[in-house]
Image: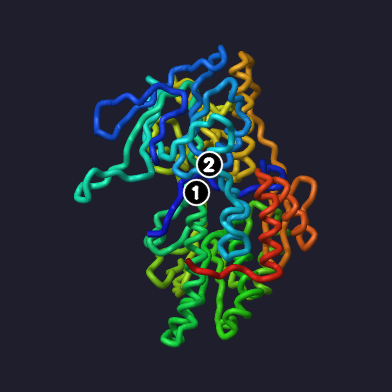
Amino acid sequence: MRSRVTTSTARTSTSTLLAVAYRPAAHTATALPLSGPRFVRALATTTTVDGGKQRKKLVVLGNGWAGYRLILDVDISKYELSVISPRNYFLFTPLLTSTTVGTLEFRGVIEPVRTARPGLNYIQAGATSVDTTNKVVTFESVYEERETDEEVPVHPAASIKYDELVIAVGAAPNTFGVPGVEKYCYFLKSVADARNIRQRIIECFERASSPTTTEAERSRLLHFVIVGGGPTSVEFSAELHDFLRKDVHKIYPDLEKQVQITLIEAGKTLLSTFDQRLSDYTMRTFRKRNIDVRTSVSVKQVKRHEMVLSDGAVIPFGLGVWSTGLSPIPFIKGLPFPKDRSGRLLVDEYLHVKAPGVEGVYAVGDCAAFETNPLPATAQGAEQEGKYLAQALNAKARGEEPKKFQYHHKGMLAYVGGYRALIDSPLIKRSGFLTWIMWNAAYITKLVSIKNKMMIPMYWFKSFVFGRDISRF
């Protein structure tokens, strides 16, 4: 089964591109045993005193766009901050597709969480339950433990108390119940996913170049199928085509003409959230590049080496990438809070969960939704929610009344390959080379750290001059 990540990795837009080993907190009480398995521990987290000032316990579950923005902006002189997440880094998702073909390297699109704020208590774990009566979160380490080789491994569990809890755990890829997707397709939500896709692409070319491979098998291996017509699918298709056009003909000259890219979308067009003219431009551009764009058709079943479509077509493939939306993770499904039809936690205009009698619990990002006028699942919306909630919590700590959340749509960006990009904003809607320059400038400007602001242009330059890294390791 291909790897999946259940943290938020929503797409970004013009102005919002920014910007478990159990470890007890540095200044909390010692761990106390709870009833249950021998690996269950508790963190005593009553309000602490720092320099004569009381600080409330703020626990953040997740470090995607919403969670990480909140972590950066919350006032740590007012809150003792703990972050619980299975991954110890923030992922700059807009550039993730570029890592799948070696245009960029993985280190350039991540930021370590532990160094985000001084004194931050990070725990690499996944939350399993929330006790709102006692204000306790239970979590399990991502690492396994066992005392003997024969013993069945277990994930150590622990709990932590909170005064304020922010749920920002993101969402999982939505398979819509299609048989075979999780077993035979790759998702594109995490660094691990991107690395697996990158290795599979190179494997397909290496196997196709082997003299022991038949023509039929070679044709299948060199057929790359992407399911979904949103920004992630479009940008991955664009990056893959760039790789084929600029690098494959040099490295695998005998295979270039046998490569096929197919993009499958159940709707009538690609990038349906963009202006229609930009969507049409993308369709025309892809078809000119011999990318087989199939719209108004869905995948009914995925087998080991082929996909069965709703129109009866059977498509053999060497690599299948699935990017068709989001669904709630098991932790969210298990919470006893009101949810919308998609399974996301309902929140009010202050991003507080709409659960009677529950105090101090908030939800942001892809796991949260407003009952009316829900936001699109983008990094723009998630980042704005995280920033707002940090300001609201800061105001609450000062004894002030926070303002209601208001979403401001600033626009969307998408790369379509060949040094061409799209911008769809309230002020401008355009495509082409100049837009690609704006696309680059926006991402360089909005990267979080100076290190990555320097590394990303260097990676682009290296790929342009020397080609992409096709090492498989």
Q: Label for residue 197?
A: none
Can you see residue 374?
Answer: no
In this view, 307 is above or below 211: above
> Disc 2 marks which amino acid?
Asp
Give the spatial CA distance, label 1 vs label 2: 8 Å
Query: At x 53% / y 41%, what residue is drawn?
Result: 366
Query: At x 75% / y 52%, what residue is drawn?
Result: 441
Element at label 1? strand
In this view, 457 is above or below 134: below
Query: At x 40% / y 39%, what residue is drawn?
Result: 331
Left or right of residue 427, residue 195 in this image: left
Can you see residue 12?
Answer: yes
Whole-percent x, y for residue 149 in the image:
22, 50
> Disc 1 marks which amino acid?
Leu
- Disc 2 marks which residue? 366
- Disc 1 marks which residue? 326
Left or right of residue 393, residue 305 in this image: left
Residue at the far top in the pictured view: 52
Residue at the far left in the pictured view: 150
Q: Are marks 1 and 2 in contact (CB under 8 Å)?
A: yes
Quadrant housing residue 246: bottom right
Whole-percent x, y for residue 321 in the image:
50, 63
Whole-percent x, y for residue 445 in the image:
73, 47
Instruction: Give 267 or 155, whichever is nearer the viewer.
Output: 155
Instruction: Give 83 or 168, whichever is nearer the viewer.
Output: 83
Query: At x 80% / y 59%, what residue is drawn?
Result: 434
Instruction: Give 239 or 354, whichever is nearer the viewer.
Output: 239
Element at label 2? helix
Whole-percent x, y for residue 183 in the image:
38, 61
First in sequence: mark 1 or mark 2?
1
